[in-house]
Amino acid sequence: MDVELRQLRCLVAVVDTGTFTDAGIELGVSQAAVSRNVLALEGRLGIRLLHRTSRSVTPTSAGIRVLARARQLLTDVEELVREATSGHTRLRLGHAWSALGRHTAEFQRRWAAQHPGIELQLVRTNTATGGLAEGLCDIAVVRAHLDLRRFAHITIAQEDRYAALPADDPLVRKRTVTLDQLRDRVLSIDRRTGSTTIDLWPVDAGPRIEYNQDVDDWLTAIASGRCIGVTAQATTTQYRRDGVVYRRLRDAPPVDVHLIWHRQDPHPATQAAVDLLTTLYG
């Protein structure tokens, strides 16, 4: 016999209420049903979970450990149910770095006004698909290089590239910079989710590379003076950091900004998101 959720619920209720009778009232079942479920759980696990006296019920040391896991499992199940049943009432927008840049706040405001029945959640996930392939979001904004044939998608914008420089770098005195001015530096790159690759420079004429794990590592490396970075314009508004200065790269190709979603069974609000983003970027 497998462990059942009702057995875990009975164990938690007994400990929380202090008696089998009160646990039954809490769960809407009889005291006998609570007792049977706890005994069945103890039998399945082969350990005693509760100390029972005429006046009190307390968990054993093993019971304390099982109780902690039971609470987590029950919470996870509740979250699973919410995820499954809230598909039409919540839209999760995934992104790896910069969301919608300077349009992020306006998108949130307009969405709330136009679609009050659908909660918008922004989810930052350090994966190339912004969490879409991992099931962490319903739609995602991506700027990284990936095979878009896997997903339905639309290109919503092109953004200028910017150099991210340490605040004391001599180049911050310039209004714009060039790729050639960066070729003797150390370039910080997030190869999983970043929009920058060494291909921006001619073969054997680019900067040295240092890899990072996410945008926070990237900013820290640049602020320390150890590296410089190249990024899409959205980063300059989404991530302002002491010690980091952004300057536009006047000779670098723009970054394509894509919205992606699953081809099969897309979220019902996908088209509404496409329409609003197209308006904002348009």
Image (spheres, rainbow, N blue to C red):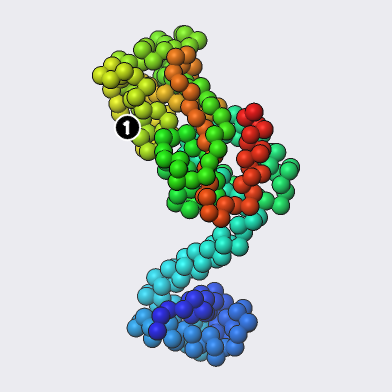
Instruction: Look at 66% across and 44% down and name the residue there.
Output: 272
Instruction: Look at 49% across and 51% down and name the residue there.
Output: 136
Element at label 1: strand
- Mark 1 highlights which residue? 211
- Foreground residue among 151 and 46: 151
Instruction: Look at 48% across and 45% down and name the residue there.
Output: 151
Q: Position of residue 105 (x, y in %)?
A: 63, 35
Position above or below: 15 against 281:
below
- Foreground residue among 213 and 255: 255
Q: In the shown orientation, is residue 63 left or right of residue 20?
A: left
Q: Is residue 245 in sight in this rendering?
A: no
Q: Position of residue 96 (x, y in %)?
A: 47, 39
Q: Residue furthest left?
A: 204
Q: Position of residue 168 (x, y in %)?
A: 41, 14
Position above or below: 164 against 120:
above
Picture quarter with the C terminus: top right
Q: Label 1 amino acid?
A: Tyr
Q: Position of residue 142 (x, y in %)?
A: 49, 37
- Foreground residue among 116 and 140: 140
